[in-house]
Structure formats: structure tokens, C-alpha cells
Image: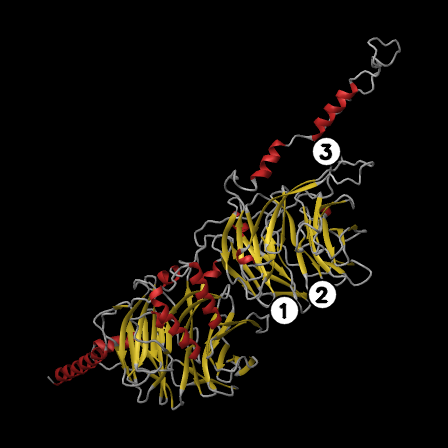
Amino acid sequence: MNKLHRLLNRLTLMSYSYVLCTVRLKMDGPQNVSSGDGCVGDVVTEKYVVESTEYASHVQLACSEPYCAFPLNGHELCVWNARSPSDQFLILRGHHQSITAVAFGNKVSPLLVCSASRDYVIVWNLEECKENALQGAAPRGTVLGTLMGKVLCLRFSPDDHAVGVCTGNKIVMLDAEGPSVLAELQGHLAPVTSLAFCAWQANLVISASEDRTVKVWDCHVGTSVHTSPVLTAYPLLSVFIDEETKQLVTGCADGQLWVFSLDETHHYRCVTRVDLRKKRQRFSATKVQSGSGGPSESQLSSTNEQEKEERIEAAFLVLQLERCDLSHILNPGCECLPPENTKCVWIGSSDGLFIFNLANFELEAVLLYKDFLGLSIKVAGSCAIMNKTINEKTFCLLTSMFGNKIAVLEINLAALVRSQQGPGMGKGLSVLASSCVLPTSPLYFGVVEKKRTKPVGRKLSAARSSVQDQPLVFHSKVRSSGYASAPHVTMFSPKTNIKSDGKRSSKCKNGYKCKEYPLESTLPGRLREQVAVAEAPTMVCCLQYSGDGQRLACGLANHLLLVFDASLTGTPAAFSGHDGPVSTVSWSHSGEWLVSASPDRSLRLWSAQGAVHTVLLGKDVFPKPIQFAQFYYIDAFILLSSGPEFHLLKYHVDTRRDEIKRYKQKSKCQPVHRLSMANAAEITSLSAANDFYSYIVLTAGRNRTLEIFDLNASCSAAVIPEAHSRPVHQICQNKGSPFAVQQPEAYNLFLTAAVGDGIKLWDMRTQRCERRFEGHANRCHPCGVALSACGRHVACGAEDRYVGTLVAHVPFGLFRRRSGLHCCLMLLHVRMRTRCKLDNWAIFSDSDTVITF
């Protein structure tokens, strides 16, 4: 009977604690929260709101599928199951002082949770705690440490054998199975705020501190491996390690993010720095311009008030960084890109939640607390986000900055991301032409002309035969012999007894064979050749290889155009005629012609066989200099840009030589069509495919926008605002190569480069940045960029005299060799050399040197 009474008393106490907890819950079931920007409540659902007796601001919370853990009433640890939200909370008691940090373990079975206060650091086994609660016994945990001071952060090791405790200026590594100190890391000058373990190197631990530095520790030895410089004027609050890209992300109290490379060859260098405030403003501006999710007229007053509040706001705390998987949402359908672009990071801040893409360093979605009217918490003091989804939904745990409320939010991840996608999703733009040319298209003129063109040789032979049949005298009868009849002499008798073995003669053979580009070849690293382009130092302004890779055209600042052999041997062919530096040069698809432009506002066409040039356009045709010129639509047109417009020209070159009338210009050029960029912005870069039929023309403007034109429809197809923080100085398309085979979707990829803003890889169909390459020094001079023939590697120049070679699916550079180059490097791919020898890259600097690798 005594045992029965004791059991009843325990059940009564347990039921009283659960009733007390449910009384404090401010709920009548799940609360659907409506959004202020037109959402219907399917994005965010506020599941529970708990009012605690003590403030829980600036406390480390924990979320691990399917549980959420947070301190309740100061010294109680509350665990909530997201899979069965109707069940009661599991209350774990053992602390006598307020809990300051909570963390879950990494293993699913057994699932551990650790809580810390000034008196104890306790590890709880949730399965055992559940069984004890069902049996009426009080759940118990294992005490790992006592009187360790205020703990700001807890973190389990990848194998859950150790727990890192950040207390004061030091990090104490405790054994997760008993009260034992494994290591003690000291070196920070201020309290340590965050900690992360390296998954692929178990001995490495990375910490962030209020002293504004990041330290890399070897916990087995107990020493510091690397210490970053002081990054900002505000304390660092959070760190996150991405295992796939081997990157470290840290956030501070002013909304700044730093991304570091943890690759062994990079020596923990900083890849990029991101300002979340500017990213949020740019994302909102793009969203308003696209018309998706913009505020209505009735909300303008509230929007203005929010802008005033943002101006008064002094801090933008980055409270939490957690993994976010968007593989089932952000699927562009391009097999040529690996799925790294779907690996994102949740950023929990004091103002809202952000989804940050580590591949392109852009925001994928923004959720601001103040935009949702029904949320109980508008400014968060602590945040924890679940790194896995449950039925495409994730959970977020928030505590109020200035109150005692604790809220659990359910976020529909798919609805959030899809509601904020750009207007380019699903438009179906493609570089490859998939339909016939419309009769209203300016390209139709070139197609009709090709069909109507007849061989010139037949006309000439017919004219000559008609002249030769005329009599030499005007008499009907001629007595003189030899005039009226041809001599009966056999002038030519063909040989018909020649045996052919199917081989062509040596005269018809080319000096090279069409060999497929080797995909397994390593990146170049050995200096092959170095040639001076002029006696005096002369800047190399532009360059381009011919389609077969046999010749290299190089435009110089001394008004000359040089054509080298691919091996840079022999004397180059010199073309002279411009009155200014040769700013752009382009080969025809056939390899017979070269087109060049200069700031002298003239356009010249050159024969690759000799130094004979034809002036197509003089200086008085365009009021502004020609920035870019190239052949287009398989040599049917010439495409050029001048000012805010680009022009489509139909040209005709007369190759006949008349020594008497050689002063007369018989070649002609006819303007066919012209289009201008939006807002009359000056074109800074232009690109179009000439190796195959394509209707797409890419342009970049001085207003930092990218605009895509469809010449088949003769209109602007898409506008990408704020493509870079500075104007784009080069657009590099993936035009492929006759020596390499790529997927059709790969031709929709193109690169853009801007001074001080890195290199971005874009997808034509989605019209969004899929990759961003950072790490090369490019702050003042416009450095060049190029894609390899296989489409897997990116080459770029740098101001630190290093050659940059990047893998297309890694968002930072891998610098291989130092070549002693100067500024403004221009790199292009060599597809094939004579005698089946391959050269991977050719590098041109702004000095008087040409270098190949």
C-alpha cells in the first residue's frame, strides 16, 4: 500500500507540472499567421507561444529533428516534439540557476541534449528521460561539470564523445560520459560566443569571440592553429561549417558575414564578406521590380514607418547559422551543374530569417517577423532553426528580445522560396535556337540572302563563254585560216588508270587532326612560351583564338593588330590601319576574316591571309566609339555596340582585285536593326554566339544591369537588375568548341566579371546567379575571364600577378602558379595545336609580353 501511495503522489506531481506548463501556453490550437504582403497564411504557422517567468533572451536554444529544447522559467529544460505537437512538454529539472545554453547531440540513437548553467553542465538521454517520465520517476541526467561560470555556447563533437563548453575566455572540452576534462583551450581576449567542430578533421575546433577574431584549435594538442585578424568593430556571435564546400561562415552583431576557406592549400583565407543589410535591400528591390510580393497601396504608410524604424535600428544581430537543404525546391533542371547550389544556410537574425546560398552568396528567401501580423515576437533575442525538414516544413524557435515569450514557428519552406522566386523562372529562354526565324525578325534578311545567293563562278564562266563565241571580224566568210575553227590538237587527256587507295594527297591534308578535347587533363602549370609583342612596353588590349585554335589575334595599344601562330613561333602578321588602340577583335566562323574596332569610331575587316583591310564604317557613322564588335549568326551579320545601342549590320566584301580601280570601295555595309538598353544605359559589354544559330544577345550596362535580347522577336526578353555592385566589364558565354562535346543545357551558362565584385556564373533559363567565384585580387583593373572548352574550368586574371584557375562548381579560386604577370590579365582557351599537341591556356598581360601555358 505504501508503494501504491508513493506512485500516486508521483503521478499527481507529474500531472501538476504538465498542467502548469499548459496553463502558461497561450494557445487554442495552432495559430495560422497571415502575412502583410499578400500571403494567405501558408508560409508561417505559429504553433505555440510560451510565457516564461524569466527572460530567455541571449540564451542558446536548440533544435534537432524532431525536437526543440529551450529553458522554461529559468532553471527548467523544456523539450517539445514536433512530430506529435499535441503531446505534453517533457520537463527536465536538475539546475538550480538559470539555464544559459542548450545543445543537441549529433547521433539519432541515443539522442542526447546538454544544458548548462552557472552551477551545472548536464547531459540528458531523451529516451531514458521519456521512460522515467512515463513510469512516474523524475528524469535524471549526467553532471559533467560544476561551477564553470556563465556558459554562452555548448557543442557536441561529431561522435558525441565530447562536449565543448564556452565559458568566459576559454573553451573546456568535457567527456560526454562522465565528469572529466579532456582539454582546455585558452587564447581569446573576450568571452567565446560560438563553437563548431570540423567534421572531416576531428581534432579541429573553430571558435568565435567577442574579441572579433576567429580561432582554429587543435583540441588534441590544446594549441591554436590559426587566428584571424580583427574582422569588425562588433562582436562575433555565430559560426557554421559547411562540410561539402569546406567553408566557414561567421556572423557578427552588425549583420556582416565572413566566409573563409578551410581547404588545406588555402591557409584559412577569407573568401568574401557579405553585408546582410545591403543584400536584403537589393533582394527587396528586385522583388518589387519583378512584381512578386510587392506591397499594396494600402500598406505604403506602414512601409514608410518600417523604413523609419530601420533607420533608427542600431543592430542587426546574426544569432544563428544552420544548414538548409533546398535540393527539392531549387532544381533548375541543368545536369551540367552539380547540386551544390541547393546547399544553403539558414540565417537567424533579430529581424527575421534568411536563406543564404553559399554557391552564389545571394539570398534565396527573406522572412521578416514584422511583415507577419500574427506573430507574437517581432524582435528576437535568441534563435534556433531545425536543419532538417518534416513534410517539407521546418521549425524555428524564438525568444523575445525585450519580453519573456518563447515561440515555436512552423515554416513551409517550399511555399516561402517559391513565393519569392524571380520572374525569370519558367520563361524558357535558351541560347540554342529551337524554332524557325520569324519573317518579322531582322535575322530573316540574312537567311533569305543566303538562299538567293548564287555561285559567282557560274556567272563569270557564262559571261566569258558568251564573249568567246563572238566572231573576230564582221564578214560572213573568212578566208584566213585559224580564226573561224579551233585547231584539231588534243590539249589535255585525263589519266584514267590511276589506282586510288582512298587516301587524300598530302597537299589536301591539314597540319593537325581533329582530336577530342581530353577531359581528364590536369590544369596547366608549366610555362611554355613567352614572346614580346613590341620593342617598347605596349599594352595588350584584346585577344581571341580562331575556331580551330591555330592562330591568335592580339590587339595592341600601338594601333596594331597582330596574328600569332598558336605556338607563338615565327613572325606574326601585322595589320595596321586604326588611328587608336585596337579595343576589340573577333574571328569569323570560317577563320578567313577578322573584324576589329577602335576608339577612333571605325570598324575594319581584315583578311586573315594578308594585311589587306576593308573599311566598313568610318568615323562619322557613330557619335560614340565602338566598344564591342563581333561576327554573328555564323558570319551572316556583324554585331557591334556604341553607346546605349547595339547594331546589327549586313556586310558584303568584294574580294575581286582591280588594279585600275583599286581606289574605289566596292565592299559595303548595310544597317539592318538596332536596339537599345533600358533607361538608355551605356553598354559596357556585349556577347553573342557565332559558332551556331542563336537568337540571344547578352548586354551589360553602366547601370549594373544585365539585359537579354531576343532578336527573333526583336525585343528585350529579360532584365536582371543589380547583377553586380559595379558595372560589368566582360560577359563570357559558354560557346563550346568543335573539339569537345557538352550537354545542350550547358550552353545556357555565361560568366560576368566586375571590378571588385568577383565573377558570377548565370543560367539563361532561370536568369539567376548559380555560382560566384571569389578570392582573386581585382579591385582596380578590369581583369579578364574565360571558360574552358569542356565547360568545367574558369580562368581569370588578378592584380596580385597570380594566374587563377577555378573549378566551375567551387565558389572560390585555386591559384596554381605565379607567372610574373602584370595587371589586366586576359585568359582564353587554346583548343588545338598542330600535330595534335594541346595547350590548355594562353595568358596575356598589359605589358609587352605574350605567355602561353
Can you give x and y, in whole percent of width and height, for residue 345 in the image?
A: 44, 68
How crowded pointer 1 is (Cα within 10 Å; few <14, some 14-19, many 20+) is rated as: some
Residue 616: x %, y % from top left: 70, 45
Left or right of 470, for residue 412: left
Marked residue nearer the N-terminal end (1 or 2): 1
Q: Which mark is residue 821?
A: 2
Residues under labels 1 and 3: Cα distance? 52 Å
Say which amino acid is labelled 2.
Leu
Tell me the quarter of the picture where residue 492 sits: top right
Camera-near label (2 vs 3) is 2
Q: Amino acid at mark 1?
A: Ala
Name the residue type under label 3: Arg
Residue 793 found in image quarter: bottom right
Q: Quadrant of the C terminus?
A: bottom right
Which residue is disc 1 drawn over? 777
Residue that label 3 marks: 504
Q: Secondary structure at mark 2?
A: loop
Q: Are marks 1 and 2 in contact (CB under 8 Å)?
A: no
Q: Residue at x 62, y 54 (%)?
A: 788
Task: Indicate the secondary structure of the residue bearing disc 1.
Answer: loop
Instruction: Looking at the picture, tell me which residue is in the foreground, 157 or 40.
Output: 40
Instruction: Choose mark 1 or mark 3, whichever is in front.
Output: 1
Specify the quadrant of the image occupied by residue 302: bottom left
